[in-house]
Amino acid sequence: MPRAAQSGFMRHSLNGQACLLALAAVLMIAPDAVAQDARSLTKEMVGEWELSTAGRDKTCIVTLKSDSTPQGLKLEFDKGCSAALPFTKNIVAWSVKGLDIVRLQDAAGQSVIDVTEVESGIFEGLRQGEGVYLLQNLAAARALSKSADQLIGDWAMVRGSGKAICGLTLTNTETSPENFAVYLKPRCDPMVTTFAPTVWRIERGELLLRSAKGEIWRFEADDNAQWRRVPDSADPLLLMRQ
């Protein structure tokens, strides 16, 4: 073989060996990284959490522990959880799967519900035929409920132009868990009276108005005294403190 060809062959061989060594290094490191991430998430999850429906109309407190059992890691549900969320009766342990899945599982290790983090401290999971459930840090969930107290009182619904189209009162009269009565004042715009909201609540930092028919208007806070309807539009709708 000519010397130039031999040199090229050797360089090609060495490059191939380097690639294989790099790939082997990645494959060796990857399981360690996954295990480290799983250990980190497990440590973060130990503590008290609120498990609830998406609207938080049904809630349950669960304490995730670091103690191991044959079924997984220990957990403890507060009294009343099985009545509020019947599927919790089948949950006996919890674990972390992969990089970011928290699994609440039965005695056989099978998933009753898997949740993944969608916001800091808020995990979301789906049960087929039932809907979405949330698992969120208990202290944060209670702080969110407390913030609702600050919104009680009289508000005006105002167009972006500054024209007021309706007055309404957010009350602390609970119609169901985390849902409170709202009352419209006289002479509201037909768009609002047709919507006819009957309850309000705070959900994931948003203020929700809901009608008896189940229609929902969502508002995000612009500041302490103003909320803007989402999704936004060319003619925005605002809630302003009176």
Image: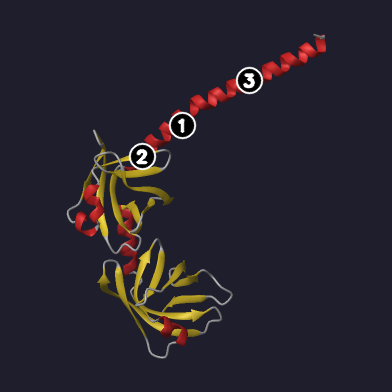
Label 1: which secondary element: helix
Q: Amino acid at mark 1?
A: Ala
Q: What residue is shown at x 54% (from left), y 78% (from top)?
A: 160
3D distance between C-alphas at marks 2 and 1: 14 Å
- Tell me the residue that label 1 is attached to: 33
Q: Residue furthest bottom?
A: 187
User: Which image quadrant is residue 53 in?
Assistant: bottom left
* Observer-nearest of 55 and 204: 55
Mark found first going from the N terminus, 3 or 2 = 3
Crowding at dot 2, Cα within 10 Å, few <14 / some 14-19 / many 20+, comes out as many
3D distance between C-alphas at marks 3 and 2: 35 Å
Give me the disc on residue 96: 2
Relative to 191, is 124 above or below?
above
Q: Amino acid at mark 2?
A: Val
Q: Quadrant of the N terminus?
A: top right
Label 2: which secondary element: strand
Q: Amino acid at mark 3?
A: Ala
Q: Is residue 41 left or right of residue 17?
A: left
Mark in front: 1 vs 3? 3
Q: Position of residue 109 (x, y in %)?
A: 29, 39
Q: Position of residue 242 (x, y in %)?
A: 41, 80
Q: Position of residue 113 (x, y in %)?
A: 33, 49
